[in-house]
Amino acid sequence: MARERTVVKGIVLRGVDTKESDRILTVLTAELGKVAVVAKGARSRRSRITAATQLLVYSDMVLSESHGWQILSEANTIALFDGVRQDVELLSLASYFAELTESVTLEGTESGEILSLLLNALYALGELHKPPEQVKAAFELRLMSLVGFAPLLDGCAVCGEEDPAEPVLDIRGGVLRCRRCGGENALSLTPGVLAAMRHVVYGEAKRLYSFTLPPEDQRRMGLAAESYVRAMLERAFRTLDFYKSLRVMSPTPKEGKTTDNQ
Ligand SMILES: [Zn+2]
């Protein structure tokens, strides 16, 4: 019986080693969404698919279905993201991107935009050397928007004012308000942060990182994006905690004084 073969491009979001030399991967593809893939013999030295089974490697993959499993039968790496891989802090942030992406994607659901978002974030970190806090905030907000949790930022949810002098984000309701319009669970933004958040949520994907904020505003946007993710998904991320612990320990933060947390 001929096995059904599928050719996809995919990035590894997670890999778990089995007792034999196999690895079970969680792969994000455009066509199949999130898919579980068995990489047989991936840890053997002679395996030609080993490189493609590492975390955050993007590859052409040939999958063969067998007993309900997708088996990785051939792979050619497209991008290893070495710039990210060689920096422990960037790798820890990218690992958070992978865990966050895994938590919001589904099997059997077209996921091309999410895949592009993740690939572009890794490129922005490792090749373009964009500030990690900027990439993190933009990635979080855009990802939430792509999976149906876009915050409503076009005007104050109470009075309709489009450009509040003192904007706040209601992180549980996912709406914008003026400070004077009251309400709870509100994080202070500034007009500059609001403009950057609108750019990220409503702008073109290919211009996602084309904004700059002064350090204090960047910190504020980072706090808003991270708090928003936590409020929407109602969970913590082990990889995020690790990334933040590295930044606290880091003697020379990469941009400004952004090591403080909540
Ligand atoms: Zn208002």
Image (tube, grey):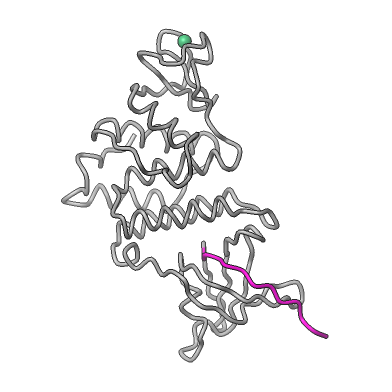
Magenta stretch: includes residue 2: yes
Quadrant where the N terminus sits is bottom right
Is residue 128 positioned above or below 62 on the image?
above
In terms of secondary structure, what is the magenta stretch mainly?
A: strand
Residue closer to the observer: 58 or 245: 58
Picture quadrant of residue 179: top left
Magenta stretch: includes residue 136: no
Q: Residue furthest right?
A: 1
Is 233 positioned to the left or the right of 45 in the image? Answer: right
For image coordinates 48% across by 45% down, the residue present is 205
Percent coordinates x, y for residue 142 in the rendering = 49, 41
Percent coordinates x, y for residue 140 in the rendering = 46, 42
Is residue 164 positioned above or below 50 on the image?
above
Q: Residue furthest bottom?
A: 46
Quadrant where the C terminus sits is top left
Percent coordinates x, y for residue 71 in the rendering = 65, 77
Is 139 positioned to the left or the right of 68 in the image? Answer: left
For image coordinates 44% across by 37% down, the residue present is 200
Q: Which residues are magenta?
A: 1-12
For image coordinates 22% across by 51% down, the residue present is 249
